[in-house]
Image (cartoon, helix red, strand yellow):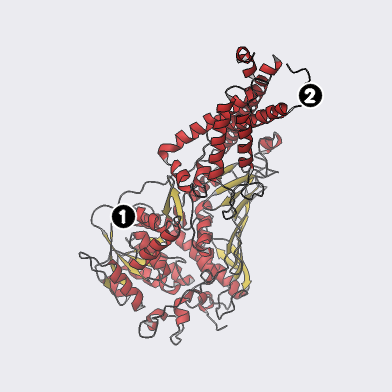
């Protein structure tokens, strides 16, 4: 009889153990989630872009300009073909599929302005259709004043951002401008004034504001999940030519095909130089290096989540340590931004905690992924396309749950991964860098969506329907001033302070900030 | 009954093997049944090897619910039959099928990147070994020796 029924208790025991374990785990989980009360945020519906199509002109059809046009729904034939090939070689390569799945925006690409003939012609040839002739304009003023464009996208070197955006706004033409919003401090104020006076809408190109995880992170921070955040750490790690701005030099580039004088504009007048034309990000004359190019993104990612505004002071150090190739912008940069008055609330006695340091650390000589961390008294959050939150062992807020063993400092208490289980095929180190930061795409209902597409769509929708832009002049102003402070601090080797009440950089005797920013010495 | 029975015979070992395998299957099934969030989506979506398209297709919205349900049911059926020693041949047969699917979804082929594995395998992994063990159970039923089969089949066996 024992040999007949002996296995019954084993069966019962296993059943009980399995059920008890499962239920206990899920009970623990729901208890934690109940306490955290974080709401994964769904994208807000954007009012549709109705009526006549918006007539858009593109200024600058380089690497970023081409990406922006794709996000608008316009891909060149070469790109379509190369993506088709890529998908044939690797079925996981979904760039073409994602592009085809993108909703059509109610826009017409009607004009292009690019000082390089090959690129301008590429736009005309690729996007001209029987009922829509794409016109090439020789100058941005001609395009903006033609009366034939409603909106322009500015994807030029930095030193052209403000002049073009101001020209557009003063002529009632809507503008989408790439980051950093401006190239000098003085321009930042002028552009703000132009935007405030104009009825036209100005959007700054920080597309990660559309990333779902960032919207959820806002909720995390608002609910005090992390307690008082005293340190934020964000990083740039790249170790490839593309990431170090050594872009390809086009074989057809020459003085005959490039309007060099127009490229230079107000920059130092030097003879034709292909290296400067295609790799302009490496010189202060046209770009702003890590501080304007990548710190600006990282700063705005956090400003979007925490809304902390311009830092009270910035100290920067670094140098040209990994690419001594004639560039004069640093390729290793450490930026400490101080926010002594900033607080998100506290779980401890009042007044014990206040103030925060935001550290941006960058190198173009190492590609190891250092994530973004927000470190609070009660918890730590890793911020990217995914969110992960760990409780802190000494947390006041979670003390009880930690003591009861319901939480463990090593085990995340919250994870948000809108793209879980979606296979990703990422083509290059640099795009991996952007993807991890939530700068390339976001996931909506399990679908991968280009965040630049969402950002442009929001801008177009506000143009048609009114409403508030998620990255308008206020956000752009804060990003630009912060980037310039970081650059100035590196160039001057001293602390740069912001006077919030007067909204000016605290003057330093004998220093003309804009002259320092624009100084582009030979190295 | 055999008067000269040794203390521990082959069939005792097979009974032990049968119960351990049943234990493993049953626990895997129960854990899943009581966890409403469990799904085989991740396992199937990350499938590798020659049958990858088949497994990927199973992750479709129309199938995944059925796949999850059938998987849990099969795990529990194998667990119960092997532990109790009743319909154990059928149980072992289903177990072989399940293990073959698990193996094929993530085969330990040296040219494939091994994902989510805790050991080092070259063609042979634990799924394959458990599959072979199920073959033994299938060929050598022991329910009449230790298990419900002993009670239910008493009339037949005597």
- In the rendered image, the quadrant that contains the N terminus of chain B is top right
Give above or below for A97 relative to B19.
below
Q: Classify residue B74 as left or right of residue B141.
A: left
For marks 1 and 2, give the one nearer the viewer.
Answer: 2
- In the figure, residue A134 lies in which quadrant? bottom left
- In the figure, residue B7 lies in which quadrant? top right
Q: Classify residue A112 as left or right of residue A275.
A: left
Q: Classify residue A454 as left or right of residue B99.
A: left
- Percent across and percent down for residue B40 are 52, 39
- Percent across and percent down for residue A93 are 44, 57
In the image shown, does A249 or A400 lie closer to the viewer? A249
Tag on residue A104?
A: 1
Q: Is residue A194 visible?
A: no
Q: Chain of mark 2?
A: B
Give above or below for A206 relative to A141.
above
Q: Badge 2 is on which residue?
A: B6
In the image shown, does B88 or A97 lie closer to the viewer? B88
């Amino acid at each position: 009889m024992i040999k007949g029924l002996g296995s019954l208790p084993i069966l019962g025991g296993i059943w009980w153990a399995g059920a008890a374990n499962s239920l206990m785990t899920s009970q623990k989980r729901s208890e934690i989630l109940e306490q955290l009360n974080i709401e994964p945020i769904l994208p807000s519906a954007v009012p549709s872009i109705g009526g006549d199509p918006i007539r858009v002109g593109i200024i600058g059809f380089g690497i970023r300009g081409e990406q922006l046009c794709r996000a608008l729904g316009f891909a060149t034939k070469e790109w379509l073909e190369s993506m088709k090939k890529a998908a044939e070689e690797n079925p996981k390569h979904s760039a073409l599929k994602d592009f085809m799945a993108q909703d059509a925006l109610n826009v017409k690409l009607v004009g292009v302005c690019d000082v390089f003939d090959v690129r301008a012609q590429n736009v005309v040839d690729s996007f001209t259709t029987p009922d829509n002739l794409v016109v090439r304009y020789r100058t941005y003023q001609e395009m903006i004043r033609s009366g034939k464009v409603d909106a322009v996208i500015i994807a030029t070197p930095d030193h052209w951002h403000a002049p073009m955006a101001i020209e557009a706004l003063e002529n009632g033409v809507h503008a989408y401008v790439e980051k950093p919003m401006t190239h000098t401090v003085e321009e930042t104020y002028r552009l703000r004034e132009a935007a405030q006076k104009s009825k036209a809408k100005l959007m700054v190109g920080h597309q990660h504001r559309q990333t779902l995880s960032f919207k959820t992170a806002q909720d995390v921070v608002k609910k005090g999940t992390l307690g008082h955040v005293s340190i934020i750490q964000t990083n740039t790690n790249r170790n490839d030519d593309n990431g170090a701005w050594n872009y390809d030099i086009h074989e057809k580039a020459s003085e005959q095909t490039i309007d060099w004088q127009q490229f230079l504009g107000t920059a130092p007048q030097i003879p034709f130089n292909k290296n400067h034309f295609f790799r302009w990000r490496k010189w202060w004359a046209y770009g702003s290096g890590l501080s304007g190019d990548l710190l600006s993104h990282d700063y705005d990612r956090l400003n979007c989540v925490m809304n902390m505004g311009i830092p009270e002071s910035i100290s920067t150090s670094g140098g040209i340590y990994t690419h001594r190739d004639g560039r004069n912008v640093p390729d290793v940069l450490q930026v400490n931004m101080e926010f002594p008055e900033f607080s998100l609330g506290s779980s401890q006695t009042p007044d014990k905690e206040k103030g925060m340091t935001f550290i941006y650390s960058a190198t173009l000589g190492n590609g190891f992924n250092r994530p973004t961390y927000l470190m609070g008294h009660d918890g730590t959050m890793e911020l990217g396309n995914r969110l992960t939150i760990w409780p802190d062992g000494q947390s006041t807020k979670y003390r009880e749950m930690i003591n009861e063993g319901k939480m463990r400092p090593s085990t995340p208490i919250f994870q948000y991964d809108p793209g879980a289980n979606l296979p990703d095929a990422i083509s290059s180190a640099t795009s991996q860098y952007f993807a991890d930061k939530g700068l390339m795409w976001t996931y909506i209902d399990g679908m991968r969506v280009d965040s630049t597409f969402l950002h442009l769509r929001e801008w177009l929708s506000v143009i048609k329907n009114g409403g508030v832009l998620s990255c308008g002049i206020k956000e752009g102003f804060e990003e630009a001033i912060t980037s310039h402070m970081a650059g100035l601090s590196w160039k001057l080797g001293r602390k740069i302070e912001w006077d919030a009440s007067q909204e000016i950089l605290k003057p330093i005797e004998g220093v003309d900030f804009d002259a320092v920013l624009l100084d582009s010495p030979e190295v | 009954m055999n008067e000269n029975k040794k203390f521990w015979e082959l069939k005792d070992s097979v009974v032990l093997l049968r119960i351990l395998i049943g234990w493993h299957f049953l626990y895997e099934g129960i854990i899943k049944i009581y966890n409403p969030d469990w799904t085989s989506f991740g396992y199937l979506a990350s499938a590798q090897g020659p049958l990858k398209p088949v497994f990927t297709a199973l992750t479709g919205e129309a199938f995944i619910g059925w796949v999850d349900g059938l998987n849990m049911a099969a795990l529990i059926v194998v667990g119960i039959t092997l532990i109790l020693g009743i319909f154990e041949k059928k149980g072992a047969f289903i177990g072989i099928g399940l293990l073959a699917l698990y193996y094929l979804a993530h085969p330990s082929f040296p040219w494939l990147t091994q994902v989510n594995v805790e050991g080092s395998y070259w063609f042979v992994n634990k799924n394959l070994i458990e599959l072979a063990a199920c073959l033994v159970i299938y060929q050598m039923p022991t329910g009449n020796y230790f298990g419900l089969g002993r009670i239910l089949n008493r009339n037949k066996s005597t």
